[in-house]
């Protein structure tokens, strides 16, 4: 690949993976325990970039999988949950009711919108639900092995973490039949023939559960067990899992020493930070969800934001103006020479030759009406006549304006003379009247109107700044707005002339 620049990080990883000679399974795993935000999404986008790079190198049998940790226990009552959810803390999220009552269970409620977003991002991923894997028996062998080798596993974890596991620790956590928790039970014995495990629970219950579906491996054991079950060969994970003594460290040893499996190639990735707010976290309420972001920008841009940065570097995201600049940056790149763009591309990617910053003005002038926007675009001298594209970009712009736009970029064309127009001084009103005369001419472009505004100001001895303010006050009811020459030619000419006349008489 002759690109005259450094090889992309996804290609570097793909090369190394192919050199191992294994059939490649790139895995991701995100717990749907709350709204899935774009910090979480980095994991899947990173995996998808590697998967695409593998396929580009002829690894036709490579797979991309997502294990949804639907069997994880609820850790605590997050701020977005009602207090009544305290009773479910410690229960698997697949067994807890949906907090909004619309889906089959708690896990599905947060999983569904995420899966829809992956669809929109055109990330084709095989989805596994952990609760179903346990229920189907995928974990049977791994659980039995873990129960048999309990002492060896405990000492490996002790060595890695420098802590001492308690005498009644078990790699398997039964789900209590009375209280529904799996964080409060202790295994008392197990019967590999009957495939059952006895337990006692802090709630006072004593009983037994089937090994298949009746409980879950603890996270440090679940992860390496899953590598072997699914044949995972590469996995990106948040750097928190990668520090010394972490679950990846114990995972490596348990994989080799208990499950006789070569651990996957690790791809630790850094956090996505929100400008001025720090690391994204759903539980702290500092996060932009994936679906929220996809309402503001095209999917290929969201991928590009992640893929252009090496996984080991953090991403600081500013959803205000810098986000718009990124969209325009992306549009200017040639996918033939920019690998990040090539890896981000979607089938439905639309080319639009109008800077996104400009779209923001167009849709506001048009009052978010696609037909009107089409006229504004034509008058402004752009060539774009596809209503579907305009509709889609209009929706992005509207959503961005509502959520992330600085106040200075929001405006509304005033249907009637706004009260603020009374602030316009008399000499500026005369200037607007002359401008109205000028605008009666045919074939004017933005530059000609712009020059004329300066010429009028000079003739009448007023500051250009004052005349500009007058234009905006008359039309928007505020002292600033989009570039005046372009703004005036983009508007309906009769409307502008009538407005300026109304103010001067
Ligand atoms: Zn729901
Ligand atoms: Zn219990």
Image: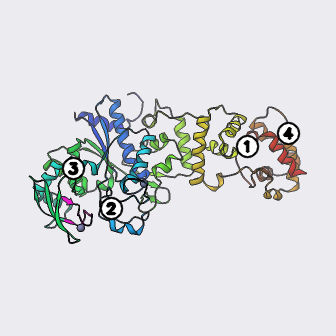
Assess whether mark 3 and mark 4 are in contact (beta carbons under 8 angstroms). no
Report the Cα–Cα distance between label 4 and label 2. Answer: 68 Å
Foreground disc of the pair 1, 3: 3
Mark number, residue 74: 2
Tag 3 near tag 2, CB within 8 Å: no
Q: Nearer the viewer, mark 3 or mark 2?
A: 2
What residue sits right under mark 4 in the picture?
438
**Nearer to me, 103 or 431:** 103
How many other residues sit within 10 Å of disc 4, few (<14), some (14-19) or many (≥20)? some
Q: Earlier in the sequence, mark 4 or mark 2?
A: 2
Cα separation between marks 1 and 3: 60 Å
Question: Where residue 362 sits: x, y (%)?
Answer: 67, 42
In this rendering, the label closer to the viewer, 4 or 3: 3
Mark 2 residue's CB less than 8 Å from ligand 2: no
On residue 224, which mark appears? 3
Q: Is residue 131 magenta?
A: no
Q: Is residue 504 left or right of residue 342?
A: right
52 shown above or below 142: above
Q: For the residues marked 2 and 1, what is the alpha-carbon distance in whole angstroms? A: 53 Å
Is disc 4 placed on a helix, strand or loop?
helix
**Residue behind mark 1:** 487
What's the magenta region? 169-185
Please identify, in this view, whether the residue under mark 4 or under mark 2 is nearer the observer: 2
Front of the two marks 2 and 1: 2
The reply to whether discs 2 and 1 touch (Cβ–Cβ < 8 Å) is: no
Mark earlier in primary sequence (3, 2):
2
Kindly state the secondary structure of the residue where label 2 is placed.
loop
Label 1 sits on a secondary structure element that is helix
Colouring chosen for the image of the structure: rainbow
Residue 392 is situated, as x and y percent measured from the top left of the image, at 57, 40
Q: Earlier in the sequence, mark 2 or mark 1?
A: 2
- How crowded pointer 1 is (Cα within 10 Å; few <14, some 14-19, many 20+) is rated as many
């Amino acid at each position: 690949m002759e690109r005259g620049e450094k090889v992309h990080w996804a290609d570097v990883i793909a090369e190394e993976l192919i050199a191992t000679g294994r059939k490649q399974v790139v895995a991701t795993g995100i717990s749907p325990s709350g709204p899935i935000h774009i910090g979480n999404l980095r994991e899947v986008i990173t995996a998808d970039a590697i998967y695409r790079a593998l396929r580009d190198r002829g690894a036709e049998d490579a797979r991309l999988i997502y294990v949804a940790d639907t069997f994880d226990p609820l850790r605590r009552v997050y701020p977005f949950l009602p207090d009544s959810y305290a009773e479910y803390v410690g229960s698997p999220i697949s067994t807890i009711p949906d907090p909004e009552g619309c889906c089959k269970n708690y896990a599905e409620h947060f999983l569904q919108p995420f899966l829809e977003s992956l669809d929109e991002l055109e990330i084709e991923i095989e989805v596994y639900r952990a609760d179903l894997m346990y229920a189907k028996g995928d974990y049977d062998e791994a659980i039995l092995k873990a129960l048999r080798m309990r002492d060896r596993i405990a000492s490996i974890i002790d060595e890695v973490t420098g802590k001492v596991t308690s005498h009644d620790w078990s790699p398997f956590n039964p789900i209590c039949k009375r209280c529904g928790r799996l964080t409060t039970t202790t295994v008392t014995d197990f019967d590999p023939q009957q495939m059952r495990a006895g337990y006692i629970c802090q709630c006072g219950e004593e009983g037994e559960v089937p090994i298949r579906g009746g409980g879950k491996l603890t996270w440090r054991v679940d992860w390496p067990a899953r590598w072997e079950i699914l044949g995972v060969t590469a996995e990106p994970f948040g750097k928190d899992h990668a520090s010394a003594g972490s679950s990846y460290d114990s995972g490596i040893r348990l994989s080799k020493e208990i499950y006789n499996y070569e651990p996957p190639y690790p791809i630790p990735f850094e956090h996505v930070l929100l400008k001025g707010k720090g690391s994204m976290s759903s539980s702290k309420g500092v996060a932009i969800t994936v679906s929220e972001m996809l309402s503001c920008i095209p999917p290929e841009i969201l991928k590009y934001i992640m893929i252009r940065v090496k996984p080991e570097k953090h991403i600081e995201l500013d959803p205000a103006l810098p986000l718009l600049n990124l969209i325009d940056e992306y549009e200017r790149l040639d996918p033939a020479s920019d690998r990040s763009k090539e890896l981000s591309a979607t089938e439905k990617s639309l080319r639009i030759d109008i800077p996104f910053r400009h779209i923001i003005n167009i849709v506001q002038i048009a009052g978010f009406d696609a037909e009107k926007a089409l006229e504004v675009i034509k008058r402004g001298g752009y060539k774009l006549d596809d209503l579907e594209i305009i509709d889609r970009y209009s929706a992005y712009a509207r959503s961005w304006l509502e959520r992330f736009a600085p106040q200075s970029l929001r405006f509304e064309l005033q249907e009637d003379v706004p009260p603020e127009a009374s602030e316009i001084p008399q000499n500026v009103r005369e200037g607007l009247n002359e401008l109205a005369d000028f605008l009666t001419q045919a074939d004017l472009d933005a530059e000609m109107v712009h020059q004329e505004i300066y010429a009028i100001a000079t003739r009448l001895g007023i500051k250009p700044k004052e005349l500009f303010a007058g234009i905006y006050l008359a039309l928007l009811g505020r002292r600033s707005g989009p570039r005046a020459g372009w703004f005036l030619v983009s508007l309906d000419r009769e409307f502008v002339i009538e407005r300026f006349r109304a103010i001067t008489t």
